[in-house]
Amino acid sequence: MQAQKESPEDMQCRDKFLLQTAVVSPGTTTKDITPEMFNRESGNLVEESKLRVVYVPPPRPPSPVREGSEEGSSPRASVSDNGTINQTSEHKTFSRAYVEPKENTTEVKALVSKLTEEKNSVIQQNNKLQQELEILRRGSSRNRGGIPFLYVIIVGLVGMLLGYLLKKT
């Protein structure tokens, strides 16, 4: 295979790649893989997936001002004939290195909103706990004196009244 020297004007391509996967026994090394392993006639389980080639324009230098066309952009990926999206590790690395640093993808936006909701929830819970702690502190400060002052006055008055009655008799 050779790289194209020029990209097509309409950025469309009909090329496809055939990916074949086969089940192998544990411990199989790359040296043990043979073309017979991908032969269905010999009873091997082989899955096939066709990947279309999609041309992606080279990344533009990032704009200091966020433009409307950049918002909500998604990373580039290849699409197989059955509609599933496939990304290779090389493609993911390329996408992260050259496309995603300045773009907010929907996945990132969803993660940010989820974390923001969790943060707000924790802040509300923290505020509730602080209010409950303050209420408990107020209640305990009232009870620190032991016997309330009103009870002491009532007992003193009853004592004086009994003393006066006993002395009179």
Image (spheres, rainbow, N blue to C red):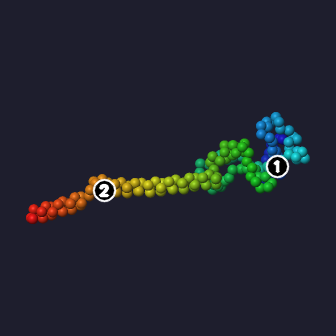
Q: How crowded is mark 2: few (under 14 residues within 10 Å), some or many (20 or more)?
A: few
* Residue closer to the observer: 5 or 3: 3
The numbered mark at residue 6 is none
Residue 162 visible? The answer is: yes
Residue at the image point whose x is 26% and y is 58% from the top: 148
Query: Horizontal and vertical percent for residue 127?
Result: 44, 55
**Secondary element type, mark 2:** helix
**Closer to the observer: label 1 or label 2?**
2
* Image quadrant where one finds the C terminus: bottom left
Residue at the image point whose x is 12% and y is 64% from the top: 165
Q: Mark 1 points at which residue?
A: 47
* Image quadrant where one finds the N terminus: top right
Q: Are marks 1 and 2 in contact (CB under 8 Å)?
A: no
Residue at the far left in the pictured view: 168
Residue 67 visible? The answer is: no
Residue at the image point whose x is 31% and y is 56% from the top: 142
Residue at the far front in the pictured view: 169
Query: Horizontal and vertical percent for residue 32?
Result: 83, 36
Kind of residue indicated by mark 1: Glu
* Residue closer to the observer: 143 or 166: 166
Marks 1/2: CA–CA distance: 76 Å
Residue at the image point whose x is 85% and y is 42% from the top: 37
The numbered mark at residue 142 is 2
Q: Residues within 10 Å of mark 1 (few under 14, many from 20)?
A: few
